[in-house]
Each structure stands twice: as C-alpha cells, then as structure tokens.
Amino acid sequence: MINFIIKRKNIFLAGLLILTAVTASRVAAGFDIAVIKLIQSFPAAVFDYLSLFFTILGSGEVSGVITAVFAAFLFWRGNKRAAFYLLLFFGLSVAVELAMKFSVPQPKVFSEFRRGLKLPIAVYSPFTPFAYPSGHATRSVILTIIFFYAAHLKISGERRKKAAKAALVILCSLMLISRIYEGSHWPMDVLGGICLGAYLAAHIAIQFQKDNF
C-alpha cells in the first residue's frame, strides 16, 4: 500500500487540484447536498457519540500530540530524519489547509445540515471564511498512512499485523464519514482532505525509507 501511494503521489496532487477547481466553481454543490442528505438520513445516538469522539480525536490538539509523541519516539530510536520530516509535513498540512480555507470559496455547511452536537470538552477551531478542505480528513489520512506503514514493518505476526492495519483503516473511514454526518464538512471538503493528506503522507513515507525506518 505504501509503495502504491508513493508511486502515485502526483495523482493525489492532481486530484487535489481538480477537486479544488471543481469546488471553487461550485458545480459540485448538488453532489455535496445529495451526499450529506444521504448520510444524515440514518440518525442514531450511537452515530452522534461516534461523531463527537472523532471530532475530538481528529482535532489539531489531539492529532498534534499524537504526531509529536510518535516523532519523539522516532527521534529516540535514532530515526531523526523521519522524526523531522513527520513534523515538517504535518505542520505543512495545517498551513496548506488554512491557506485554502481562506482562498477556496466553498461555503461552510448550511445550518440545516448541522447536527448541533455539543462537545464535552473544548477544542480549538480557528476562524476561516470557507470550509475546503477538511483538516480532520487531512490529518487523519496522514496519520493512518504513516501508522499503517509502521504496522507493516514493525508488528510481528501476520494476524496481528492485519488486525492493526484493519483497525487503522476502519478508524480513518469512520472519521471521514463522521465529518459529513455531523455536518462539519461537505463531501468535497473531505475528498480534498484525503488527497492532500495522501500526497503529504507519501513524502513523509519517502523520508522514512531514506532513514531506514
């Protein structure tokens, strides 16, 4: 999977550019509304609780701490190059996300589609005039790909390795869906975040390989 992503990193970049142009033109507005209506047509308390959990898990604070801890672990193991580039590209993802949210005219999700869920704890959410791309999606994809790579290399036993990979994919998928279900982002925002995250994760993985992780 990692080599697949690395070899096709420019496809993810092209996908991001195409999605950005389509989103800015607003020709996908009907698609966004149709998909968010479909996903929200199955409301349930368990989905609300899951959305709250994933909102906190994917927040800048929590995902940033997870990234910093993993970078510290890499540094301690002697993979200083991998640690540096993990932090660099994770920080770059935030910078690119914010720049796009100030420049790509994708309106935030209409109030009628917001679930109005109340977080049990406060998380920081910087003001941006637009919604594209989803930062939660970007960060989640980056961490999922990197931890998937780590699981493939460092976990012994095929069954445990497969279980860890499956858990990562399931968690990431639920994170992505929850952003739409909760009404925090349009589907196009999430798709843009996936492409941005995959492109940056590919560059992180390349540095991991160069550092013999």
Image (spheres, rainbow, N blue to C red):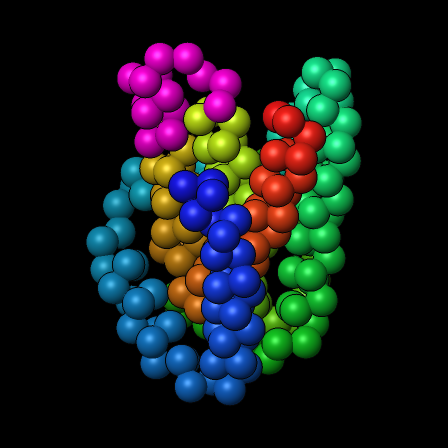
Quadrant occupied by the C terminus: top right
Q: Is residue 143 rendered to the left or right of residue 36? A: right
Query: Would you identify the image quadrant in which residue 172 lies?
Result: top left
Residue 68 visible here: no
* Extreme residue in the top direction: 156
Residue at the (28%, 59%) spot, across then down: 39
Q: Nearer the viewer, residue 155 or 143?
A: 155
Q: Quadrant of residue 128?
A: bottom right
Q: Say which of 118 and 81 sits in front.
A: 81
| Residue 190 percent across, percent down from the top left | 46, 60
- Evaluate whether residue 13 shows in this view: yes
Please provide percent x and percent y for residue 31.
34, 76
Along the viewing direction, whichever of 138 and 148 lies nearer the viewer: 148
Q: Residue at x 69, y 30 (%)?
A: 211
Vertical placement of residue 83 versus 109, above or below: above
Tell me, yes or no, whether the highlighted magenta stretch contains residue 157. Answer: yes
Q: Quadrant of residue 162?
A: top left
Start-end of magenta stretch: 153-166
**Vertical side of 82 occupied by 91: above or below:** below
**Residue 166 location, x and y as percent?**
33, 31
- Residue 51 drawn at (x, y percent): 41, 44
In what quadrant of the picture does the N terminus appear? top left
**Residue displayed at 48% across by 56% down:** 8
